[in-house]
Image (tube, coloured by chain):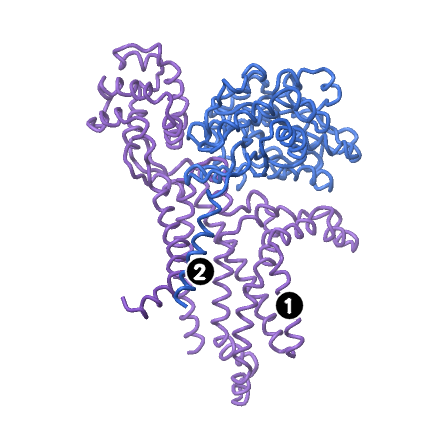
Chain colours: A blue, B purple
Amino acid sequence: MKHKISTLIAAAVMAFALPSDGFARDLTIVGFGGGYQDSAREHLFEAYEAATGTAVSDDVYNGEMAKIYGMVETGNVTYDIIMVEAPELVRGCEDGVFAPIDYSVISADKFIDGATHECGVGGTGWGAAMFFDKARHPNGPSNFVEFWDVENFPGMRAMRTGPKMTLEAALMADGVAKADVYDVLATDEGVERAFAKLDEIKDNMIWWKSGAQPLQLIGSGEVDYAFGYTGRIIRANDEGADYQLNWNTLLYSIDYWTVVAGSPMMDEAMKMIDWITDAEPLRAQAAVWPISPANKEVNADPALQEANPGMVLNHSEEGLFISTEFWIEHGDELEAKFTSWAAQ
Amino acid sequence: MSKKSRISWLLIAPLLALVLLGFILPIGYTLVKAVENPEVTAALPRTVAVLDRWDGEGMPPEEAFAALVTDIEEGQRGREFGSMTRRLNFELNGARSTLMQTRRSLDELTAPYSESLPAAIPEWGDPQMWQLIKTNSNPITASFLLRALDLQITPGGQIEAVPEERAIFIDLFKRTFWISIWVTLICVLLAYPTAYYITTLSNRAASYAILLVLVPFWTSILVRTTAWFILLQREGPINAGLLGLNIVDEPLQLIFTRFAVYVAMVHVLLPFQILPLYSVMKRQGTDMLRAAASLGAPPWRQFLLVYLPLTMPGVAAGAVIVFMLSVGFYVTPALVGGLQDQMVSYYIAFFTNQSINFGMVAALSLLLLFFTGLLIVIARKLVPNLDTTIKA
């Protein structure tokens, strides 16, 4: 009896102890999922595995940084390469959660300007813009000023919850030039001005949280005009919807590939990032999915531009680049202000 | 240790481990996170040492300027600098950009730094930045807990209310408890007759009725909340029905309202109230009611003086569970509520994943735990009173 109990305990202890570091695991790459990752799995991840023989598996997360911080703190790092948004990249790099990029392995020259960072390199561009269903509204608003005009364009609007992108849009609707948006927003008067502009459409506004929602809201007729991610809007149009997407209302940024600090496969991770940001695999991916890679050569390829007019980084002239540093510095303050404004 | 006591320790060992791992450690860790303040001392050790001897009046000595320049130079490659700038920016908006600019212009600075530094970056000519560093060199801070109560510490160390347009947390706590109290009340009012009705059924019918309560209980919260999302939307079945019956002329705004939050939360939480009530009522039986009736009590008296007090433990048990669960609700208000209907967990998620400010996460969690505990204590004080008044 006694012997049995001690065997049981020993077995239980082993069961807990083993999976954490008992076995070598695949190189693990983690993104935000969706159609983008499906295409990346085939043309980047599996292609890399086939080309080099390094076993790769991929996983999906929602950008929850708590999980990554937890991994680094406990030393149980199960993700190697992850895709992150720009502000998280900067903060995580400062906190030592992401490892510095080894630019002797990854060539910095192939990226567009601004897509190389101490701890990350540009993966894909993304953007959000105003759109509506042409079947319901043949003549919808064509810019931010008209989006705000509830007299001539009555109906409900939808925008992303929170101050980011919202305040920029409000200022542009109030006549601030694109180039001046962040300068104005950095002043107290500018913030007041943006919120005063938001007051005008507060009663006509529904706030969404996840990227799938604006499509659902427009599709079901819940709202008339919405702000949504361009990739999803283009995809909906490919699948038969007839949505008008206004590129002149584009707000865009870049998501980065980075390596989690303490990854046991640091060298392999750097090699893989270099491979999946090269022109060849990205061309293959672009053939099946409207990506907008931060690779200079692919992004400037006229054939791809024609086949894929939704490449966000080719619309940079029309759009506003979301300032990473502005939101790291003012994010908390404006978030509090936005919440307090919304609750009134 | 005797063999017997060794075995009994072994038997309770899983329980002890559970209490330690699932209760004491996380709460202790949260408590530490809510008050610890290591960033400034780690990134600016020399500056902190010099400012320690400074009285905080007027400008600090040249020594402090030189120490700051050395600290920033030494800290170029380290990870401490960035988190320190964000920590100070939390206390004083703009502190991060001041420090970042300072790091960028280090090469242009020459001794004496008390002249060249303010000349390059005017913020250093104001005692405020220096006071801010001095105040936050303390390894423990009440800053996060205070902020979670809409208070802040000035660079000089005074406690004051945050400007009205940025005060959010007191309202947030009020709203969280207000929603939870209403959800609990509605659950009690709906569950009581339901549970009673089930006790009057035959055993066979009762087990089917319980199954009807349990099936949604086994369904994921996300699925049930999404179902309400579809039902309540502008072109959803409820609005279609109301329009079809000519009750309304245009679709009602049902989704993204407080109403939707109540409906979905009550639906999710109702089984937690019905099941304890049913078990108490079932055990109670109807003997006492019949006894009361035989002594001449009219139905309302039987209910108020006999049945209600006897089933009160079921009401209380269910209500406590429902209340505690609603206080921590996240998914349901996030999906079907508007921005005015979000609860504390929404901000815990925000600070965890977007703002990455674990001090605020811990402070909000602790205060939520504290207020919930307080309310439960008050309720326990009130319920026996209620009990005795009814009996008297």
> Percent x, y for residue A116?
53, 20
Disc 2: which chain? A
Q: Secondary structure at mark 1?
A: helix
Residue drawn where x is 55% and y is 44% of the image:
B340
User: Are there few (<14), some (14-19), or many (20+) residues within 10 Å of tag 2?
Assistant: few
Q: Nearer the viewer, residue A49 or B15?
A: A49
> In the picture provided, is A153 more to the left or to the right than B117?
right
Q: Nearer the viewer, residue A113 or A192?
A: A113
**Mark 2 and mark 1: span between their CA atoms?**
37 Å
Residue A152 spot, x, y in % from top left: 72, 30
Examine the rendered structure and indicate whether residue B15 appears above or below residue A23. Answer: below
Residue A200 percent location from the top left of the image: 61, 32
Which part of the image, by quadrant, shows the N terminus of chain A?
A: bottom left
**Which residue type carries mark 2?**
Leu
User: In the displayed image of the protein, which residue is found farthest to the front?
Assistant: A3
Residue A8 versus residue B65 in the image, above or below: below
- Given residues A114 and B56, the one toward you in this image is A114
Determine whether label 2 and label 1 are within 8 Å by CB: no
At label 1, counting other C-alpha atoms closer than 10 Å, the crowd grade (few under 14, some 14-19, many 20 or more) is few
Q: Residue A291: which numbered mark, if any? A: none
- Mark number, residue A8: 2
Q: Position of residue B325 (x, y in %)?
A: 50, 56
- Above or below residue A208? Residue B102 is above
Q: Is residue B206 left or right of residue A335?
A: right
Q: Nearer the viewer, mark 2 or mark 1?
A: 2
In what element is the residue under mark 2?
Answer: helix
What mark, if any, has residue B211 been given in the picture?
1
Q: Is residue A149 visible?
A: no
Task: Kindly indicate whether the residues beneath marks 2 and 1 are on one polypeptide chain.
Answer: no
Chain ID, mark 1: B
* Amino acid type of the residue that numbered disc 1 sits on in the rendered structure: Leu
Residue B274 appears left or right of B43: right
